[in-house]
Image (tube, rainbow, N blue to C red):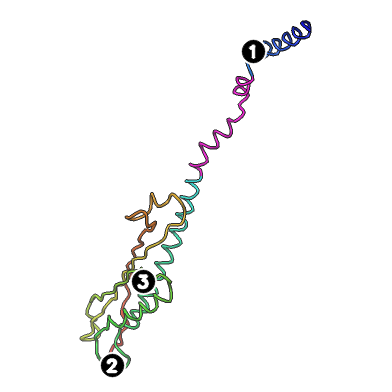
Amino acid sequence: MAFKGSLILSRLSRRISSSGRSGADRSLKTGKGQVTVELMLVLPVFMLLLFFIMELGNMAYQTLLVHHCAYELARIGSLVAGPRGGSSSNDSDKGKAEIKMRSALGKMFSNAGQIRLSAKTEFTSLDPQARQHMNEDLVVELVFPAKLVFPGSSYFFADEPKANRTYDIKVQVRMPIEKPMFQ
């Protein structure tokens, strides 16, 4: 019995002395788990960068959409703001144009109540070819609250308060008001 016990002890001591380390030290040397630790350190930064790039694409899309919408609204408003056909009046009707633009805005966006739309008319010049004919431009200003979609992007892009996760896209478009010219 004593012989078997000493045999087991001698084999065990040879294994320890041949490796020079215990089992826990050996696993640190082989690097098991190193990839997992590096992945856990790099993955959040990579995901934040990926979401950041995707949010930039989303912002570009929404900006193009709002610019096109403002252009179309200004075009509608400039056609409606002019005097009625056959009228020799040179007056423009900004109120009628705003009503028509708000109606069109409601058809373009479901959140039209949150979008700020304003219009004003500006005199540009007196037409030298036709007396008493003032040229006017309709200036349309549109402020669109764009939603931020991806996580982490509101920290960089959102307007105050950041908890709303929105940023305002401000667009101003100038369009000449269509007026008939009488001589």
Residue 113 at x, y percent in the picture: 36, 71
**Amino acid found under the numbered disc labelled 2:** Ser
| Most foreground residue, 144 or 82 | 144
- Distance between the Cα atoms at labels 2 and 1? 104 Å
133 relative to 73 in the view: left or right: left
Dot 1 falls on a residue whose secondary structure is loop
**Amino acid found under the numbered disc labelled 3:** Gly
Q: Are marks 2 and 3 in contact (CB under 8 Å)?
A: no
Q: Which residue is mark 3?
A: 113
Q: Which residue is mark 1?
A: 20
Q: Residue at x 43, y 49 (%)?
A: 152
44 w.r.t. 132: above or below? above
Quadrant location, the C terminus: bottom left
Q: Which residue is mark 2?
A: 87
Magenta stretch holds residue 19 = no
Residue found at the very far front of the displayed protein: 1
- Tell me the quarter of the picture where residue 115 sits: bottom left
- Distance between the Cα atoms at labels 2 and 3? 35 Å
Mark closest to the chain's N terminus, 2 or 1 = 1
Residue 102 at x, y percent in the picture: 35, 77
Magenta-tinted stretch? 23-46
Q: Main secondary structure of the magenta part?
A: helix
**Amino acid found under the numbered disc labelled 1:** Gly
Q: Residue at x 46, y 51 (%)?
A: 151
Give the numbered dot on residue 140.
none
Q: Please tell me how crowded label 3 is: few (under 14), some (14-19), or many (20+) other residues with Cα within 10 Å.
A: few
